[in-house]
Amino acid sequence: MKQFKDVVEEINRTLNQLTLFENVVNTTLVFLVSYLLLSVLDFHPMLSLIPSVAYLGFYTYISMKASKPMIVEGKYASLREKLRTAADNVHMDNPIANELEYEVTNAMKNVELSMFINPRTISYKIFAVMILSFLIIFATTMNLKIADFAKNSVPNIFQGPKGAGNFVAAKLNTSGDIFGKNDIATLGDKELNIRLKPVDFKVNVKEEGDSQRQKFEATFPSELAVKETTAYEENIPQEQQELVKNYFKKLAEG
Amino acid sequence: MKNYKQVFDELQKELGKVIVGQQDVVEQILVSILCDSNALLEGYPGLAKTLTVRTLAELMDLKFSRIQNTPDLMPSDITGTYIIEESSGKRQFKFQPGPIFANIVLADEINRATPKTQSALLEAMQEKQVTVGTNTYKLDAPFFVLATQNPIEQEGTYPLPEAQADRFLLKIKVAYPTYDQEIEIVDMYAAEAKDRRLKVMLNKNHLLTLQGLTRQVPIANDIKQRAVKIIHATRSNKEIIQYGASPRASIGLILASKARALIQGRNHVSNDDLNFLAYPILRHRIVLNFEAERKGMSVDDAIKAIIDKVK
């Protein structure tokens, strides 16, 4: 009986590990696909954590709840109904139950791990993970966007305090009737197509080049003049200044 | 388990010397015997119901008795009665056991007996004892009642109430033989009489041991739950069923499935056992409603619908 208990525990442990591994690979795929989509749709890419965590949680729960003997029986017809019966009655000690346990234990020697995991499918999934990773790197480097839903559709919960650039993008282009097309500013006869991107305020050091030393002139230009600041005393007659001073002094003393 | 299967195979083979076909009927009777319970056989006259039961009793070396039920049959005709006996010049009452004191009792055409007589028989089936006057007599183990019922000739009969029918584990339908089987029957019985000696395959002790083993057959939790779901579904399916089966049916279905597994040499209960035995277990325990009858649905159709629904 103890030997059969070990067999049942091993089945549960091994299949739990396998399903967890498969779930992690699938979750990675879900994360990368949603990350890529959210990036090109200009949503915050970290939103992809939501479907990934939901997927992992849901499928881990389902796979942990699933009867492992049933999974083995699905692959080995000779164990159909026997394995789960033996597993459910592992505490039973009578000649018939013992015979069943013995029979199942012997049959389990033919069970191969490779039956429960498809190497080809896993290889494809890992390959897909690689491809998606490259696509994400490419899309973020090229700042690739196919639509800009983020600002008009959902609040960006991952964004920090709004800066000047964000304010312009979010607030100014609101009314097409008064200002013309939202994304086009008219300058004389020429149309200037301006696209405001909150990410563009970041300075690219490589594009800016080396810093330049600025020179300042030592002498002020002639149109500049120094003038003394004026105070309220200047408009008070000389004889009343002492009176006003005392008034304020008493006022200050309370 | 293979040894047990061999025993039942030999038994069926031996029975085959007398009975042609009817393997399912024989299997269900054996199921009933292994469950230490009773069965109701329903079939048209001339389908070897009595012969099957009698032959089985012979093969198992069991005491067999037959009660031909009629409307004037009294309970004491079944249970037995006190008679005055004279011994050494003294007269005293002595209990004369009735035909119920056997191991296998064939109650032919049980629906012809009056309810009073039926209930005397059913009490013996349930309690495995008989009370006459102030004395109670235990019946010998193993004890089975195999009652037969004729689906035709309903006039002058007292159909078993549902509550009493519930005490039979199985209601076995005895069908007509196929054309080939009938040819074989004709060859067997219309030709020159042969001496068909039967070999005793089991005895009382073997049977009691097998009854004990039946209860030891393990069953998977999901199969057990499915059995209960099937019985539950008979109570919740108000669209076609007016009265569903009792928990006694759940116990019966699981126990009968274990017995069938033992007969077939399996050390576990299968879903196939449930699917096969749900019919004889439920046939006499559910009552269809008017809507189902209006649609021409039979009880077996309703059972099939439930089995298909509960996967």
Image (cartoon, coloured by chain):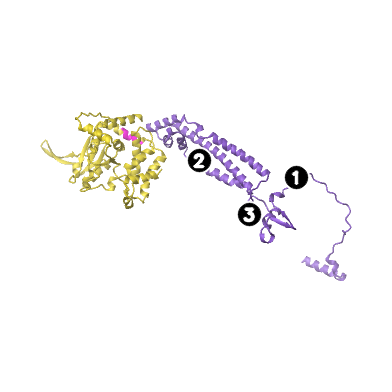
Chain colours: A purple, B yellow
Marks 3 and 2 sit apart, C-alpha to C-alpha, by 39 Å
Residues in magenta, as a range: B209-215
Q: Which residue is mark 3?
A: A152
Query: What whole-number distance in Å separates the C-alpha atoms at marks 2 and 1?
Result: 52 Å
Relative to residue A224, is residue A62 depicted above or below? above
Q: Relative to the observer, which residue lies in front, A168 or A47?
A: A168
Return the mark for residue A207. Answer: 1
- Give the mark count: 3
Mark 3 and mark 1 on one chain: yes
Residue at the spot of label 2: A63
Query: Which of label 2 and label 1 is nearer to you?
Result: 1
Which of marks 2 and 3 precedes in the sequence? 2
Q: Mark 2 vs mark 1: which is more N-terminal?
A: 2
Q: Chain of mark 2?
A: A
Query: Of residues A208 and B111, which is closer to you in this image?
Result: A208
Residue B99: horizontal and vertical position, in percent?
A: 20, 39
Question: Measuring 89% from the left and 54% from the top, which residue is drawn there?
Answer: A219
Left or right, B152 with respect to B236, comes to left
